[in-house]
Image (cartoon, rainbow, N blue to C red):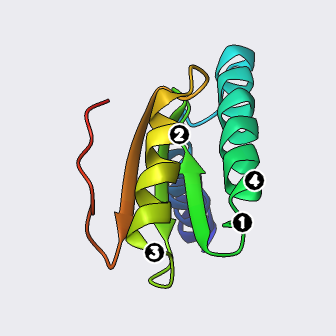
């Protein structure tokens, strides 16, 4: 019975070490993310799109943003161009209707 318990504990510890990742961000990566987040949220707020989009910022400052289907093509293109031209944003991948709508150069 003791060997089963020890075996169970060892298996549990091995399983837990498999869950450990190196996903912690450095202070520099956090600062990059914060600058990008501030830039994105500012542009979205200025264009009244805060409720019509969702985004994720990678640790290198690259933005992945998804716009709601209700956002017009004109507004979508304008906002994506603004985001891509912002120095605090390293790159932008923007989607609408489940696809990248405009493939503007970065």
Q: Can residue 7 be seen here?
A: yes
Residue 87 occupies quadrant: top right
In the displayed structure, would residue 49 be above or below residue 27?
below
The residue where tag 3 is placed is 72
Q: Which residue is at the front of the view, 91 or 42? A: 42
Q: Residue 46 bears which disc, if any?
A: 4
Secondary structure under badge 3?
loop
- Foreground: disc 3 or disc 2: 3
Residue name at image x 59 percent, y 68 percent:
53
Q: Local crowd at mark 4 within 10 Å, few (<14), some, or many (≥20)?
A: few
Q: Which residue is at the front of the view, 60 or 71? A: 71
Q: CA distance from mark 4 to mark 3?
A: 15 Å
**Residue 50 falls left or right of residue 17:** right
Q: Residue 91 bears which disc, if any?
A: none
Q: CA distance from mark 1 to mark 4?
A: 9 Å
Counting residues from the N terminus, which is met first, the one under dot 1 or under dot 2? Answer: 1
The residue where tag 2 is placed is 83
Q: CA distance from mark 1 to mark 3?
A: 14 Å
């Amino acid at each position: 019975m003791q060997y089963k318990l020890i075996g169970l504990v060892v298996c549990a510890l091995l399983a837990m070490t498999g869950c450990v990742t190196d996903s912690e961000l450095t202070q520099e990566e956090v600062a990059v993310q914060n600058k990008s987040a501030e830039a994105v949220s500012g542009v979205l707020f200025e264009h009244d799109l805060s409720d019509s989009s969702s985004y994720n910022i990678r640790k290198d400052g690259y933005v992945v943003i998804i716009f709601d289907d209700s956002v017009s093509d004109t507004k979508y293109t304008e906002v994506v161009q603004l985001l891509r031209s912002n120095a605090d944003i390293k790159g932008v991948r923007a989607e609408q209707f489940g696809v990248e709508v405009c493939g503007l150069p970065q």
